[in-house]
Image (spheres, rainbow, N blue to C red):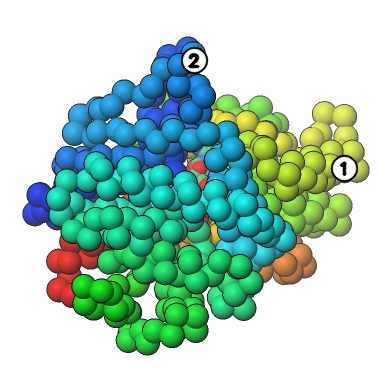
Amino acid sequence: MSETSGQRAEQEHRDSDQELVVVANRLPLEYDPETGWRPAPGGLVTAMESVLRDKDATWIGWSGRYEDDRHQDVPPPPTGSGNLHIEEVLLTRAEVAGYYEGLSNGAIWPLYHDAIVTPIYHRTQFDTYRRVNEKFARRVAQSAPPGALVWVHDYQLQLLPRMLRQLRPDLRIGFFLHIPFPPAEIFSQFPWRRQILEGLLGSDLVGFHTKDGAVNFLRLVRKFLALRPGGDRVVVDELSGTRTVRVDAFPIGIRTQDFVELANSPEVQDRAREIRADLGDPKTLMLGVDRLDYTKGIDVRIRAVTELLEDGDLDPTETVFVQVATPSRENVEEYQRIREDVELLVSRANGDIGKLGVTPVHYLHQNMPRTELAAMYVAADVMLVTPFRDGMNLVAKEYVACRVHEDGALVLSEFTGAANQMAEAWLVNPYDIDGMKGAILDAATASPEEAHARMAALRHGVFEHDVERWASDFMRDLEGRRGW
Ligand code: GDG
């Protein structure tokens, strides 16, 4: 199935000879003091690979180097690899603090995730956000060939499409938001809401993970900009005449084949057996894998599992829960707080229900190699994905792709974009701890027949909607080849 969409994607890209410029906060490279610059393992890079494979493309982003590091120990990134040309935007420490850690991660991130943590609005940070968006826009305007396609990614760069259009009206601009786009009741509190909406409408195409995100955006455009969207289109008036912006859902997927190959490899199979053995060959191995972020519901999940073990619904001598929490945004205060909360919950759980030689909750605050992650997916009987809000959630899809024997159970929050496509999971409301306990118990004790039926259906969906389909659907729309 994934091959079909892969072939389709390749054909699509050969059909177009327009050059592509990708703009994202980060470059697809990271610096390692031992080995130098290397490809960054992040999801965006992997997701974009199929689009970048057959096109001449430029990727513009921040490398992680500061402007005042320019002459210091970190060398500049290489400017090209294959047909991908790299352009580094350098930021000052003050810009990173105001634009990235401040407005992006202290205001927009929590606001767009249902304001589960109170967003903090600083006028000086918005000013920095605007200036950094301008810096990126000027860079793209200088580099993009005439008539190029520009694909802008994510919440750090929402003002950029409009700025870029003013500088370069010849470009075709697409924007994709990787996080949820909230409803009016929440978005309206943002002090610079008009600027964000106008910024995004600078695009020809605005993409979200879900229909809800697209509908929320269209309603807000009507409410605050007094425009009258018709269906999935908004007509905007400009000095040069009218222009149509298309708004739609493009649910992201994963590179399914990569995970199937990993899961089938002898190395990963052996490692999965070893992991189970190291954990004392439990009857039920439950797993959570997340960036350590307060949106992911790691705390509520640990509480639910701990209560099930305390109540005796699950046997602590036969059940192990492993939580991988990848370090994330450690300079932002709320992330330090969630780390402390999670670590307290883990140590309390083990203190209360553990015995000598019995540790029911294992917690790893570290970055795993992808093979190790795949081995964990292969080893786990039950996968717990319980965010309070999540744009999509790729972990749920990766687990399903790795279940090559069509067994295992996925417990999934209703408030993830993935839940729209994964109705056969055990869906839970992460705010309802009793409901969550019930679902975890059902998933852990499901008959092999039920687990198999659910997993087979889940796998069908994940293979059907893979990342190549996401990228080719977005590119086809951006190129205007869907006839609009
Ligand atoms: C944003 C949106 C949306 C995690 N730990 C390790 C590791 N990971 C990988 C996972 C997965 C990725 O990181 C996480 O992706 P998610 O989708 O789960 O979440 P976010 O990071 O919040 O991503 C989200 C996504 O953008 C794409 O649009 O789905 O809603 O929030 O691929 O496997 N990878 C490795 N080691 C780890 O320790 N190698």
**In x, y percent, where is residue 27?**
39, 36
The amino acid type of the residue labelled 1 equals: Arg
What residue is shown at x 9% (from left), y 49% (from top)?
A: 17
Residue placed most toward the observer, 264 or 88: 88
Q: Is residue 79 above or below residue 132?
A: above
* Residue under pointer 1: 348
Q: Is residue 282 above or below residue 452?
A: above
Secondary structure beneath dot 1 equals helix
* Quadrant placement of the C terminus: bottom left
Q: Is residue 189 above or below residue 376?
A: below
The amino acid type of the residue labelled 2 equals: Gln
Whether residue 33 sits left or right of residue 205 in the image: it is right
* Quadrant placement of the N terminus: bottom left
Which of the numbered marks, if any, corresponds to residue 434?
none
Residue 297 placement: quadrant: bottom right
**In x, y percent, where is residue 269?**
46, 32
* Residue under pointer 2: 72
Q: Does residue 236 appear in the picture of this structure?
A: yes
What residue is shown at x 47% (from left), y 46% (from top)?
A: 132
Whether residue 369 sits left or right of residue 476 in the image: it is right
